[in-house]
Image: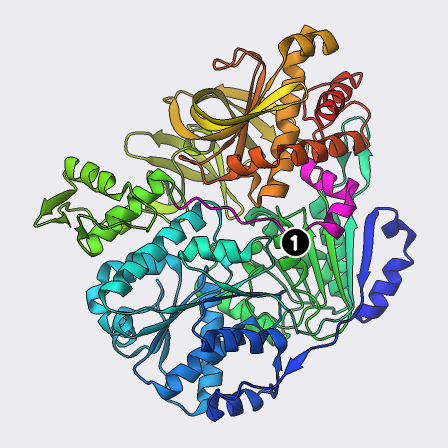
Amino acid sequence: MNISQLIEYLQNDTDFLANVRLWMKTDPVEAIYEEWPYWVDDRVKLAYASRGIEKLYVHQKLACDAVAKGDDVVVVTPTASGKTLCYNVPVLNELAKNPEARALYLFPTKALSQDQLSELSEVIERTDISIKTYTFDGDTPASARKAVRAAGNIVITNPDMLHSGILPHHTIWIKLFENLKFVVIDEIHSYRGVFGSHFANLMRRLLRLCRFYGARPQFICCSATIRNPKEHAETLVGRGFTIIDKNGAPRGEKHYVIYNPPVVNEDLGIRVSAVKEAAKIGAMIIRNNIPAIIFARSRLRVEIISTYLRERAGSIPVVGYRGGYLPNERRAIEKGLREGKITGVVSTNALELGIDIGMLDAAISVGYPGSIASMQQQFGRAGRRGEPSLAVMVATSSPLDQYICNNTDFFVKANPESATINPDNLLILMDHIKCAAFELPFEEDERFAPHLTTTIEMLEYLEGEGVLKKSDGKFHWMSDIYPANEISLRTASQENFVIIDTKEKNRVIGEVDYYAAPTEVHDDAIYIHQGRQYYIDKLDWERHMAYCHEVDSDYYTDAEAKTSVNVLEQFETRVMKGASLSHGEVNVRSMAVMFKKIKFNTHENLGWGKIHLPELEMHTEAAWLDFDEEMLENRFGRPMVGRILYSVAYILRHIAPVFTLSESSDIRVHHETRSPYSGKPAVFLYDALPGGVGIARRVFEIMELIIEEAVKSVSGCACKHGCPGCIGPLPDKDGEAKNAVVALLGGMI
């Protein structure tokens, strides 16, 4: 059975169709071609012609011409549309006529870097031009690093290595900085939240060094479809960009399916496991030798689905792919997929980005991946040959997934979300000013970015702390600390906790950030890593270490924390029906107090224990609703107020990520029956990271939209009395709380 026959079979399978909430078909699209630009070196043209590329897609031609004019360019087209050529052609053309020129390629992951090296090396070999291309990352042997620095025309790396391995050592990278003509940034949509905020400061440091060495590189950026690609590129780099978004690539017939597993308990709103349903559908596809990829949201789910598939697929090769595998293992899997030796792969979002993994005919996403942009990326992994393809989202019982199932128009019509970053987050900014001062002394009147008038105040603060010393009108680095080693680009907190397996010669198995440690690695917690369970024997709070040993446990732990939110400053406010909405700075105090032992599969509560750890404090940004207390009590009765506030917070937290391009873990909620600030019942939605990264501001701007969609989600839920798929897991025997939430939020819009 081929993919067309499978699609036809499923369209006539009544059992399958009973759970389908959306089946959408898009027609094939022909390619739009343009001739090669006249200015491209003939050797480059011939190299591509030998690979079957005799004409360019229209977006490739537009991008190449914009770069030739000297513009900084951002290319925004769907997955598998040939964006790589948009930067490789201008770069190779420049290197063909100027052998001393240099280009820096930045990719968010090592896998993408390796993939690009393979692609570039093949093209360069066919040009017969001497262009040295190297990857520079943690896997690059010490013996090769000197050659990369001295002779690398194209250096392919990732942000983490640029941060800690290149910029602080710029004096041995003089050839790169003095001759840098191009900086290529691929997958810019992945630079959002904390990672994106760090990355924008990394670009400030890079450009500062380029100015020092007399270079002004051009930027060529590529992105999956997001709502604000031009604005996002400009915020990341600090320059104006030309956008190229006219897609000329062909596309085959595509079938998009949203599948909601059947309900097994109507009162509790519990459905058949999405993991099992995805494995069942995936096995049916793979057993017919149809190449497919299944995306799961956690490493544990990857391992579980891989196990189920292997049991059902017989001798057909199926593999898992996720973080934690050794580099050689990942490269072998990628090669096996490209060569067609592996039929099925189960992956985290590690394969969501543009790695060449060959021709897949089907893609399955287990749960909504958190954004329309990610969904398009995952679905775009199938259908790369102009042939029909099938993409299926298998929904979980979460409010987010049930919202998508009950509002399929959202998937069909919605624009991708905006990427949100806050490069001027004080904690992140201070980290990078330290790194920049280590790299080059700051002039007294220098600004780290043109608008940052506070640069001098921050430098003087660091001088007062003994980190910098002012001499001859310059601020010089004085500390013994190597600042880049102290800073992770993936988190706003530097104070991570290391997890150590005491039975494996004190091997480090992972780390968690400062604010997650009390709930994830407290004494007696079960910590799950790469599908294996570890019992936390002791959390050493002072030394930031958690000691554990591996166990075979039939339960996991779920910690609870007491939280209080105090408003420090109200930036802006506006009146809504029955409430006022505000945005401002808050102080969040949180203390983990207890944990529950939850049995795997049945989710029974097997017991509980106390947690004895210090209270944590964090300054961040929040958006909050202050409700009219008298109105709430008159409409719903005083005993219901707390329950309603809990449910409002619960559903808003699950709907907000849809419209803010953030993970659900990036937003936290808290409700108070009497807010210390306003004295009114209140619901807070706040950034889960110190200083905030702009999510709360975005929530403030679009709160009406979030509330409107929350009402649709709760009222459209098929449960009778409220469930974890709409208003949360608290008991609601007569549906009174569910009706009250719909009435309250519905009245606000």
Note whether 53 is above or below 717 in the view shown: below
Note whether 53 is above or below 568 in the view shown: below
Q: Is residue 310 left or right of residue 572?
A: right
Q: Is residue 658 left or right of residue 444?
A: right
Residue 270 in the image: state x and y as whole percent: 75, 33
Residue 29 in the image: state x and y as whole percent: 75, 72
Note whether 69 is above or below 538 in the view shown: below
Q: Is residue 363 left or right of residue 15?
A: left
- Range shown magenta: 397-423
Residue 630: which quarter of the image? top right
Q: Can you say which quadrant of the picture contains the N terminus?
A: bottom right
Question: Does the image show residue 328?
Answer: no
For the residue marked with disc 1, what is the amino acid?
A: Met
Note whether 533 is above or below 32 in the view shown: above
Q: Nearer the viewer, residue 141 or 246?
A: 246
Which residue corresponds to the image point at 63% horizontal and 27% vertical from the top-left? 650
Q: Nearer the viewer, residue 683 or 522?
A: 683
Residue on which the image places disc 1: 375
Question: Does the image show residue 499?
Answer: yes
Which residue corresponds to the image point at 66% horizontal and 12% vertical from the top-left? 641
**Residue 249 painted magenta:** no
